[in-house]
Image (cartoon, rainbow, N blue to C red):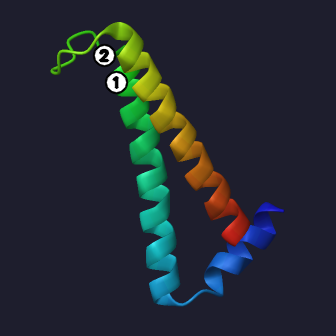
Amino acid sequence: MLKKIFKNIQEKSLKERFLLVLAILFFMFYLVLGLFIIFMKEFPLDMAMGYRIAFGILLIVYSIVRGVRIINDN
């Protein structure tokens, strides 16, 4: 399966590969941002811990949705 994915990526145009890399970077950005918001001790914004956890989980779920869309488009 992994071989099929790499073959599919190599068949894409340069623009499509760039957009795929950009989509993967944003997937990782939202995932890491959600984890930072939940686990960072000295959070710069004054938010209650319950709201921080909710916002962090929302960002993580959004990143998972983006990841699933990346996989389905390829």
Other residues around mark 1 within 10 Å, as few (<14) / some (14–19) / many (≥20):
many
The residue to which callout 2 is attached is 40
Callout 2 touching callout 1 (CB < 8 Å):
yes
Amino acid identity at mark 2 = Met
Q: Can you say whether 70 is above or below 6 in the image?
A: above
> Which quarter of the picture shows residue 32?
top left
> Which quarter of the picture shows residue 66?
bottom right
> Foreground: 20 or 69?
69
The residue to which callout 1 is attached is 37
Residue at (60% x, 86% y) in the render: 12
Residue 31 position within the rendered picture, expressed as x and y whole percent measured from the top left: 47, 38
Q: Can you say whether 2 is above or below 54 in the image?
A: below
Residue 35 position within the rendered picture, expressed as x and y whole percent measured from the top left: 43, 26
Q: Which mark is residue 73?
A: none
| Residue 74 in view here | no
Residue at (42% x, 43% y) in the render: 30
